[in-house]
Image (spheres, grey):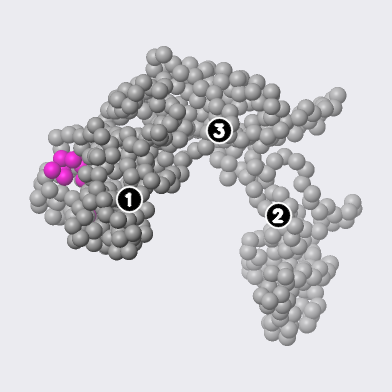
Amino acid sequence: MERLICTGRVRSAPPESPLALVEKFRGAQRLAAVDRVASALGLRGGMSLADARVAVPELLVFDHDPHADAVLLDRLADGCTRYTPNVAIDGSDALVLDMTGSLHLFGDEAALIDDVEARMKRLGMEVRAAFAYAPDAALALARFQRIPAADERMAVMRLPIAALRLEKECEIALGRAGLLTIGDVARRPLAAIAARFGEGAVQAIRRMIGEVASPMIFRTVEAPLVFERRFAEPVARTDYVLERLAELARQAMEALGERGHGGRRFEVLFFRSDGLTRRLAVETGAATRDVKAVMRLFRERIDTLDDPLDPGFGYDMVRLLVPAHEALAASQLRLEGGEARARHQVEELVDKLSTRLGRKRVRRFRPRDSHIPEQAQLALPAIEAGGGQADWAISPSGNPPLRPLHLFDPPQAIDVIAEVPDGPPHRFRWRKVLHEVSRFEGPERIASEWWRARDGNPANGAPTRDYYRVEDCRGRRFWIFRHGFYGDEGKHPGWYLHGLFA
């Protein structure tokens, strides 16, 4: 039978002080959540802060930060992977762990709950935990049952209908009909419940009693390669843990070598003894089995953290995952090794910069199959684009470049004196400076992507562009275009400066 445990954060404040989180709602402050002490004093979520202050003057108030709550819950979920790889987040306050096949590793249900509570207590947190035969039942017991019961199914039947998490209107209708507990609803014919309260109520009951499976989306899929090291006693020295990580990296490279693969992404999880977990990841632009290179990236990543690694009470486990890997065949090096060495150095530089600055801040241009100049290339993360040779259009030897090195986005409007209707430019003004054209080349006519226009009609696309490569009297070269034709695609087509040649 499937066994699940559900844990949720209750509070993290001194037990003697009432605590509330507040948020703005329609220009006023209201309570977003209250702790157990504040609840016992009659405070509830949704109350205005002014009313709460009158009722409980000693109330401690903090701003509600949903993002920080989500980050904390995510880190707790990472920590729960020490128990099982199947961890799901439910709402903003609960975790569901599928312990099928792994419960025996921790003794029994009571021993597992004791371990969870001990770790959370070190963080100043309290939890409610419940085991059940279905995820919805475990969540309901954890949220609505104060004292553990010997019979799970009977305990579920005694829970209020609020545990079904139905629409508010449906919950009110059930209450008016005298159906106050889950058992009251479950004992009625489900066809009658569906006819009166909707199919959603029936499905919620069937999930609660385990007749149908509850849809669960686990956070992560077990990586194909996982290596971990557990410590007999918590270790407070980060350098020692990194040495053990290097040993795990060597094991990973040996396993990758047996498959003929190399890793592209490496993740490490540092499990603290208090239950918190820190996850770090590095990527490489090409598949690798170089342990030293991967460890350099991890150290680079650690050195650039805004929130440095804190061992707290010590680490009791470190886990290395290789979630992305691909084939890595042997390559033939040239005798002098110059080209291969240079390419390897570039890849190392890209990996290092991407790790230090962020994968999206270091980019490499790749060609795109489009004749529209500003759409002919893509700026991709350099670590993702790869280091292979790009198939760029290159001008014949001895000819000037077809495209400028610098494009303006968007093109900059200029004032032009040119022959009408489709003559070349004679002079133009850009940024309040007049340029006399001494030489020009063109036009190069570039039409819009008419196949993307409405109904396939070219007239519904963007106006045609006539590009000119021009040189002014000082030898400066520009790439300008006329957008449209006189009297056809526009009575007064505009002129634009699109790029500068070196």
222 versus 31 height, above or below: above
Q: Residue at horizontal 43%, vertical 31%?
A: 100
**In this rendering, which labeled residue sits more in front, label 1 or label 2?**
1
> Do we see residue 476 in this rendering?
no
**Mark 3: which amino acid?**
Ala
Badge 2: residue crowd in 10 Å (few <14, some 14–19, many ≥20)? some
57 versus 300 height, above or below: below
**In this rendering, which labeled residue sits more in front, label 3 or label 2?**
3
Q: Residue at horizontal 9%, vertical 50%?
A: 55
Q: Residue under label 3, please give it.
A: 223
**Mark 2: which amino acid?**
Gln
| Frontmost residue, 256 versus 471 | 256
Q: Regarding mark 3 in the picture, which secondary structure is present there?
A: loop
**In this rendering, which labeled residue sits more in front, label 3 or label 1?**
1
Q: Is residue 41 left or right of residue 407?
A: left
Residue 288 shown in magenta: no
Mark pair 3, 2: CA separation? 34 Å
Q: Position of residue 493 (x, y in %)?
A: 69, 78
Q: Residue under label 2, please give it.
A: 377
Mark pair 1, 2: CA separation? 55 Å
User: For residue 489, which numbered disc appears in the image?
Assistant: none
Callout 3–callout 1 Cβ contact below 8 Å: no
Residue 37 shown in magenta: yes
Callout 1–callout 2 Cβ contact below 8 Å: no
Q: Residue under label 1, please give it.
A: 205
Q: Quadrant of residue 252?
A: top right
Badge 1: residue crowd in 10 Å (few <14, some 14–19, many ≥20)? many
Q: Earlier in the sequence, mark 1 or mark 2?
A: 1
**Mark 1: which amino acid?**
Ile
| Frontmost residue, 200 versus 9 | 200
Q: Earlier in the sequence, mark 3 or mark 2?
A: 3
What is the magenta range? 30-40
